Structures are given as structure tokens and as C-alpha cells.
Amino acid sequence: MEVVLTQDVKSLGKKGDIVKVNEGYARNFLIPKGLAVVATEGVKTQIKQQKKAEEKREEQKRAEAQALANKLKGQSVTVKAKAGEKGRIFGSITAGDVADALNKQFNLDIDKKKIQMDAVKELGTFEAKIKLYPEISTEIKVVVTAE
């Protein structure tokens, strides 16, 4: 019997998969628990349309991330911090500070979790990697200046 999974089922498949199972397993376990529905032609068509729509959304997100990566590539963002003698700053510059600076300077709302960099504790220019999408990332320069 063919069923369409409505939720992920361990050792059987993921949501939206069409799988063949024993009739007793489907009628006594999967369908009553709401884990699957019988795979009719209408349901199969609907699943295919949903998968196409999801692929289209993913492709659009990927294209937007690539455009943003191209826009940010090679850019520099300036972060001001209080500094003492010999170029040491009080505290450190973190990914959150860089995200705030990107928001102010480029009007971009990038999550601080996507910015990969070491904590900066002195004045100068440093590299930061921004991971925008799986397999799409770009590098920017972080310029730390004294206030």
C-alpha cells in the first residue's frame, strides 16, 4: 500500500515522501496516528506541486543570498571603540558589533550568528566571514578605529 507521510517517520522517510508499506502497518499505525495518508492520484499531484513550489522558494533564497554576497564582497565596515595606549581597546569587538555596524552603514539586517570572526581587542583592520546561505559566503574587512 502506498502512503504519503505527513510527518517525518524514523526509518521510513521524511514528510512528503511517498512510500510503500504493509497494509496493516498503514491502517493500524500510520493513518490513525496522523503520520500518513493514503496516496491517491490527487494527493500525489498535490505533493509534487508543493515540492516544486518549495524548490522555487529555495532557489529564490539562494539567488538573493548570492546577490547579497556579491554586494558585500570586498566591502569594509568601520567600528569605533574606546582605546587606550598602544592601540588596545577596552573590551572587544564581536560579531554582534559588526552586525550593528553593517545595519547602520549598509542598512542590512544580518544575524550576528552568520558572522564568523575572532574577538578583536586592538585597533586595525581584520577579516570577517559572513555565511549567508549554505555554500554561499563572503568576506568583509572590519576596520576598528578609536573614538
Image (cartoon, helix red, strand yellow):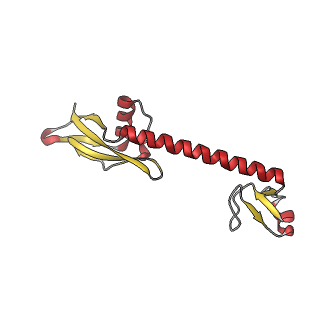
Q: Position of residue 98 (x, y in %)?
A: 34, 39
Q: Is residue 141 left or right of residue 16?
A: left
Q: Identify the residue shown where x is 25% and y is 38%.
A: 143
Q: Is residue 85 left or right of residue 32?
A: left
Q: Position of residue 71 (x, y in %)?
A: 38, 37
Residue 104's quadrant in the figure?
Answer: top left
Please count the marks in the image: 0
Q: Position of residue 82 (x, y in %)?
A: 23, 34
Q: Is residue 20 left or right of residue 61?
A: right
- The N terminus appears in which quarter of the rendering? bottom right
Q: Identify the residue shown where x is 71% and y is 66%.
A: 12
Please tell me whether residue 104 is drawn above or below residue 40 in the rendered image: above
Residue 68's quadrant in the figure?
Answer: top left
- The C terminus appears in which quarter of the rendering? top left
Residue 92's quadrant in the figure?
Answer: top left
Which of 101/92 is in front? 101
Q: Is residue 128 left or right of residue 15?
A: left
Q: Position of residue 51 (x, y in %)?
A: 67, 50
Which of 79/72 is in front? 72
Please tell me whether residue 109 is drawn above or below residue 43 in the rendered image: above
Q: Identify the residue shown where x is 22% and y is 40%.
A: 89
Q: Identify the residue shown where x is 25% and y is 35%.
A: 81
